[in-house]
Amino acid sequence: MYDGVSTRNVSNDIMCSQYDGHDPHTLFENGKDGGQFDFEKGLDALLRIGDAKYIYLAGIYWKNFDFKKGFRSIINSNNPEYIYRAGWYWKEFDRRIGLEKLIESGNAKYVYYAGLDWKVFDFDSAFSALVSTGSAEYIFYAGAHWKKFDFHRGCEALVKTMNGEYIYKAGCIWKDFDYRLAWQCLESLVDSGVEWRTKAFASNEWRKGLLRVWQTISK
């Protein structure tokens, strides 16, 4: 015979066993369907598996979800994609801590995306982190699409990458751009810069920018 405490423990073990042993997709789908699903035990089982993708999806689609538990697990996963996605779609998310983890990851792509999509975002901290990655692609995109961007420092960081393609593209669409500094860089890329110098001379924005530079030099 079992005493009351032992009976409850056995009962809890049986209930938990109904959720353990499943793959994360099945657990997620069971919670999404609802019915007699125990969301607390289901989430605990999902957290034990630790699959960031399905924890993120559960936070969107389950009708009952413990965002504090889910947040801790997503953050500890060190998965920048799902930290970014949860920060965009979850109803509850600490974006300050989320951004800190994205910055720690050194992943320029998801720092950039978070700057596009998160409702609350520290652009100053994110900008410094982004330029430190040396990613010409995402420095360029941030200058093109972020609502707050330091174009002077951004141009300096972009030129340091020595990436002719993104230096050229930034000169075409950034609303503030140092054509003198950028052109010096393209000239220094003797062989690899030929294509981008040629394109620059065919671009209205580059021609106007370079004309202003040359007029200043000639005075």
Image (cartoon, rainbow, N blue to C red):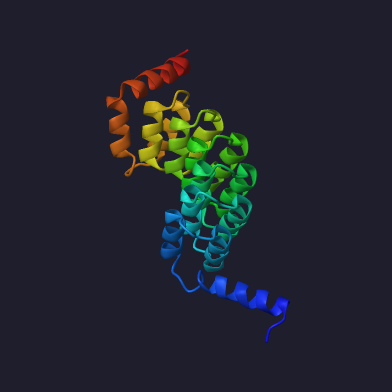
Q: Is residue 45 above or below residue 208?
A: below
Give the percent coordinates (x, y) of residue 83: 53, 50
Give the percent coordinates (x, y) of residue 198: 28, 32
Residue 172 in view here: yes
Specify the farthest residue to the bottom: 1
Give the percent coordinates (x, y) of residue 141: 43, 36
Work out whether residue 9 or residue 181 is closer to the camera in this orientation and state it: 9
Work out whether residue 63 or residue 92 is closer to the camera in this orientation and state it: 63
Specify the farthest residue to the top: 219
Q: Is residue 54 left or right of residue 201?
A: right
Q: Quadrant of residue 48?
A: bottom right
Question: Residue placed at 52% from the left, 34% from the top?
Answer: 154
Q: Quadrant of residue 187?
A: top left
Q: Is residue 91 above or below residue 145?
A: below
Question: Residue placed at 62% from the left, 72% from the top?
Answer: 12
Q: Is residue 137 above or below residue 182?
A: below
Residue 159 in view here: no
Q: Is residue 10 left or right of residue 60?
A: right
Work out whether residue 142 or residue 158 is closer to the camera in this orientation and state it: 142
Specify the farthest residue to the front: 1
Question: Residue placed at 58% from the left, 48% from the top?
Answer: 103
Give the percent coordinates (x, y) of residue 115: 52, 37
Work out whether residue 75 or residue 129 is closer to the camera in this orientation and state it: 75
Q: Quadrant of residue 40?
A: bottom right
Q: Quadrant of the N terminus?
A: bottom right
